[in-house]
Image (cartoon, rainbow, N blue to C red):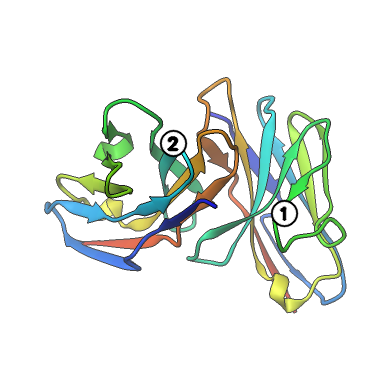
Amino acid sequence: AQSVAQPEDQVNVAEGNPLTVKCTYSVSGNPYLFWYVQYPNRGLQFLLKYITGDNLVKGSYGFEAEFNKSQTSFHLKKPSALVSDSALYFCAVREAQGFKTIFGAGTRLFVKA
Amino acid sequence: SAVISQKPSRDICQRGTSLTIQCQVDSQVTMMFWYRQQPGQSLTLIATANQGSEATYESGFVIDKFPISRPNLTFSTLTVSNMSPEDSSIYLCSVEDETVSWNEQFFGPGTRLTVL
């Protein structure tokens, strides 16, 4: 069965500093990996995905994520955090042959000015 | 990207009653999903609703409690039946718009349900 873990409930970063939000996964076969963001009082928005190809995936709002097969990780990164990046971030995984997406518990990102 | 609307946006209901949540999409989509989310917590998939077939429910969710209709490619309803306070949650409709991008899900704004 597929699963995804976000080990940090909360990440605190100063504005302008790099940020990392961690995600590890477990899935049979090749994974499809996703990051979604939920801003306060707004719906979930797609950020980026890894399906195949280059391990470094670039997405919306300057975010990127690196797929590491050996470590079964898909950490979300941004070189310079903005206060407006403060939100709830979800990592998600899907088996390549399936259509069911499993979401992680979420990591709340706080960026201080 | 697909634009999704949900009705109602929120409701407060009495124990034992039922509420039907509507999900409307501005484009035709094959795959539609219903999730439940406690505020600030993760999403739990209730069921997958594809047009022309019966909804597929996840473990812990049954059709008698959460009946789903999918009459066409732009609309679906989820009913929360015989509600109890434990059903208080945010219910989210989600679709995959394969004409935009495969695998990416678009989410509605959610329906915040409180059961007294």
Q: Name the residue under label 2.
A: A30
* Image disc number at residue B8: 1
Residue type at the position of mark 2 = Asn
Label 1 packing within 10 angstroms: few (<14), some (14-19), many (20+): some
Residue B105 place in picture, x, y as percent = 54, 38
On the question of residue A113 being in view, the answer is no
Relative vertical location of residue B16 with respect to residue A3 in this rendering, above or below:
below
Nearer to us in this view, A66 or A18: A66
Identified at 51% across, 61% down, the residue is B42
Q: In this view, does B33 lie to the left or right of A24?
A: right
Residue at the extreme top of the image, as rendered: B99
Does residue A78 appear left or right of residue B86 in this picture? left
* Residue A11 spot, x, y in % from top left: 26, 64
Q: Is mark 1 on a helix, strand or loop?
A: loop
Residue under the point 51% across and 42% down: A94
Label 2 Cα crowd, 10 Å radius (few <14 / some 14-19 / many 20+): some
Q: Which chain carries label 1?
A: B
> Contact (CB < 8 A) between labels 2 and 1?
no
Secondary-structure class at tag 2: loop
Q: Locate residue A105 relative to residue B54 in the image: left or right.
A: left
Q: In this view, does B38 lie to the left or right of B61?
A: left
